[in-house]
Amino acid sequence: MGRSGKRASLRALGEAWEAGITLYDTARSYGGGESETVLGEFLAGRRDQAIISTKFGIVPMCLPLWKRVAKPAARVLISLAPSARAAVRKRAGSQVVQGQFSVGVLRESFHLSLRKLRTDYVDVLFLHAAPASVLEQDDLLSAMERLVESGKVRAAGISADPEVIGVVLDQSLRFLRVLQFPCNIFDFSAPEMIEARPNGARMGAIANHPFGGVTRVHQCRQILERTAAGPGLDATLREKLDPIDDGVLADVILNLILSHRSIDAVVPAMMQPDHLERNVTAVTRSRFSSEELSLLRERISQAEK
């Protein structure tokens, strides 16, 4: 419900469901507060077959009617003039309020999430883009723990940058059982911290933003092109890398992330049906062996140095 309208969003959800995807990651702030509503409509009648994670801490502003009406026009503008995307995104960013971590916001936000999602529980509730300081708010953490004890939340978690994930791991807050963090082939710091921790209670881990943005995708493509053209590469692997198209990139990026034993799921964005198809094919029918992926990870690491 950001770049895509309701009809396209429902169609995308349907295609994802048919492809076997059952984890849906949303938030109160996504799509100006509309994402949960569309997801709830889609999951009606199949809620028990899906895993829903949502978040609180970033509050969408209540938009006047004229702005809500203008959203479809903005989508058309972007489709006709992609250069306008940055300006539209900047405006969208001003329509949310970040850092809203209070017990009152938690209660109101979670109540709205349940209503919009048409459910009486969520599988995971995340603190959204939380700073390390939120871990000092005992009243807030206790309120989240009570939601878990009530059964309305199956597991509490935190969605944050790797630096904050490190603080969470050091403090061993047992009721925070799921971590979500950005992870791409140039930054494996979060899963490496998780895997280095002493044996203890197993924490779930969801990697987001796996492609790292346009710049990172371009860097990855360049490194793989140099690797494919360089010396000392097995002929079979060289053939698999020719050409370095979007399918190869998805295959390398998603499988290198999922090769970490600490990561349970990866949640890439999907704006077009072919994105979904490429990503599903990458993780279910990878063209690369584990040995080949290890070699590619080594080449990417060396190129970064």
Image (cartoon, rainbow, N blue to C red):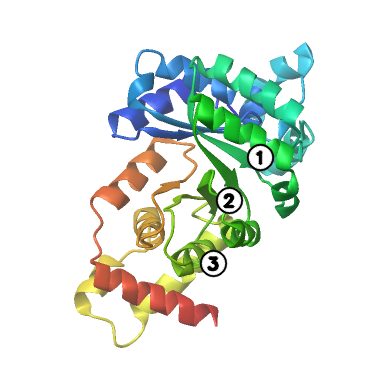
Q: Amino acid at mark 3?
A: Ser
10 Å crowding of disc 3: few (<14), some (14-19), many (20+): some
Residue on which disc 2 sits: 173
Q: Is residue 159 visible?
A: yes
Mark 2 burial class by Cα count in 10 Å: few <14, some 14-19, many 20+:
few
Q: Residue 264 or 80: which is nearer the viewer?
A: 264
Task: Estimate the x, y position of residue 67 in percent, counting from the top left.
Answer: 76, 19
Decide if residue 37 is on the left or right side of residue 46.
Answer: right
- Which one is in front, 292 or 121? 121
Residue picked out by circle 3 = 189
Q: CA distance from mark 1 to mark 3?
A: 25 Å
State the mark number for residue 141: 1
At mark 1, the secondary structure is helix
Q: Quadrant of residue 227?
A: bottom left
Element on which disc 3 rests: helix
Mark pair 3, 2: CA separation: 20 Å
Provide the secondary structure element on which disc 2 rests.
loop
